[in-house]
Image (spheres, rainbow, N blue to C red):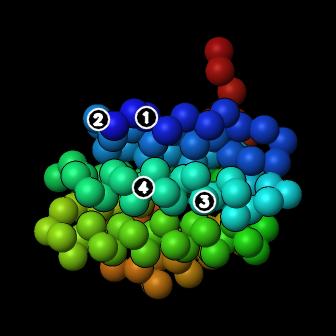
Amino acid sequence: MDTLLIQATAQTPLIDFNPVTGIMEIKGRSIPDDSESFWGVVLTWFDTYMASPLEETLVRIDLEYFNITSSKRILFLLYKLNELVDLGKKARVEWYYRQSDEDMYEVGQDYAFMVHVPFDFREYTDNDLVVA
């Protein structure tokens, strides 16, 4: 199975799903014109991954903004993590948010309440993003 790599744009996030490491990364903004088309590719790939998943899957989410249709698709992905746990696999989410973005933290809390996988909340500041 190949890695799913979709480069970020102004409207869509980076998607870097690696079936060899079990690390799935979503980063950026998600306001695609056609959410069904964009997220459909992601969810279909993940369905294929679920046919022979690793013992542990980590989903890293670092979104600065997403629209309501993207929110629903992200929730579908998180529900799939529940299915992995039901299969006896380990799954967890690392939810990244800016210290100044309380709304994104609260959205992560809402998602964590809706699924049965552990969430690890990772706060960062704009200073954390400076590369020397």
- Residue located beneath label 2 in the image: 20
Measured Cα–Cα span from mark 3 to mark 1: 16 Å
Kind of element beneath mark 2: loop
Label located before the other in sequence (3 or 4): 3
Q: Residue at x 30, y 73 (%)?
A: 83
Kind of element beneath mark 1: loop
Q: Position of residue 76 (x, y in %)?
A: 52, 72
10 Å crowding of disc 1: few (<14), some (14-19), many (20+): some
Q: Is residue 18 above or below residue 118?
A: above
- Residue located beneath label 1 in the image: 3
- Residue located beneath label 3 in the image: 40
Kind of element beneath mark 4: helix
Q: Disc 2 or disc 4, which is closer to the eye?
A: 4
- Residue located beneath label 4 in the image: 46
10 Å crowding of disc 2: few (<14), some (14-19), many (20+): few
Q: Are marks 3 and 2 in contact (CB under 8 Å)?
A: no
Label located before the other in sequence (3 or 2): 2
Residue type at mark 2 is Val
Label located before the other in sequence (1 or 2): 1
